[in-house]
Amino acid sequence: MRSFDELLAEAVAAHGHMCAGQVIGVRMALRGLRELALDPDVRADRKRLIVYVEIDRCAADAIASVTGCRLGRRTLKYVDYGKVAATFVDVETGRAVRVLARDEARELVDDYINGVDLPKYEAQLQAYQMMPEDDLFVVMPVRVEIPIEDRPGRPVRRVTCAACGEGVNDGREMIVDGRTVCRACAGESYYRRLHASRVE
């Protein structure tokens, strides 16, 4: 596997800037991969890996960069928990580990910057690179059941929404008043239509 410095440089290039979140994400990914004995530089290992990220911030980009997992490949999953955490799943063995960034790590930053007066984010950036993993993370084995509809590959099934006429893949539809509809038409929309849909 490539070195931490190489992986961090690649993550920063993909993300667009260096920050403490990049450091946390790279180290988190390395810890999760080590726990599962997987190397993303080995194609066969990379194909065994699915990662769930729990936050949509800088660390998620770093985790994707290190692991090679992507939303478009269905190997990177985003669950909106607002936590700096990720779960690494080996789909071949079923083993999984969740790595959570400790909130207490922020309080330990000064212990690692040798009394140098730095802005908060610069201090975190430096400290998180040298902080022992046990001070930085909580690591726990977990069990993750991945439904067939959520696995990589072609869609398992596709239906058409009875309200808007749009296609819906892999069991994301809902049944409302006996009709098969998409989540948006069922009232879970994040957007508001400005014009009538095709079916209406």
Image (cartoon, rainbow, N blue to C red):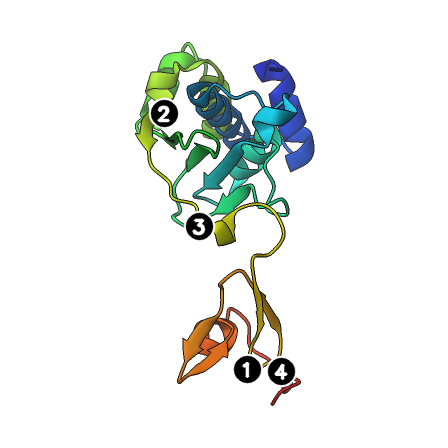
**Along the horizontal axis of the image, is 175 left or right of 168?**
left
Do residues under tags 2 and 4 come within 8 Å of each other at their CB atoms? no
How packed mark 3 is, by other alpha carbons closer than 10 Å (few <14, some 14-19, many 20 or more), is few
3D distance between C-alphas at marks 4 and 1: 19 Å
- On the image, numbered disc 2 is attached to which residue? 137
Please tell me whether mark 3 sits on a helix, a strand or a loop. loop
3D distance between C-alphas at marks 4 and 3: 35 Å
User: Which mark's residue is nearer the viewer, 3 or 2?
Assistant: 3
In the picture, the quarter occupied by the C terminus is: bottom right
User: Which mark's residue is nearer the viewer, 1 or 3?
Assistant: 3
Which residue type carries mark 1? Ala
Q: Earlier in the sequence, mark 1 or mark 2?
A: 2
Instruction: Tell me the residue at 62%/74% (across/down).
Output: 166
Do residues under tags 4 and 1 come within 8 Å of each other at their CB atoms? no
Residue closest to the far right: 13
Q: Earlier in the sequence, mark 3 or mark 2?
A: 2
Along the line of sight, which residue is nearer the eye, 19 or 86? 86
3D distance between C-alphas at marks 2 and 4: 46 Å
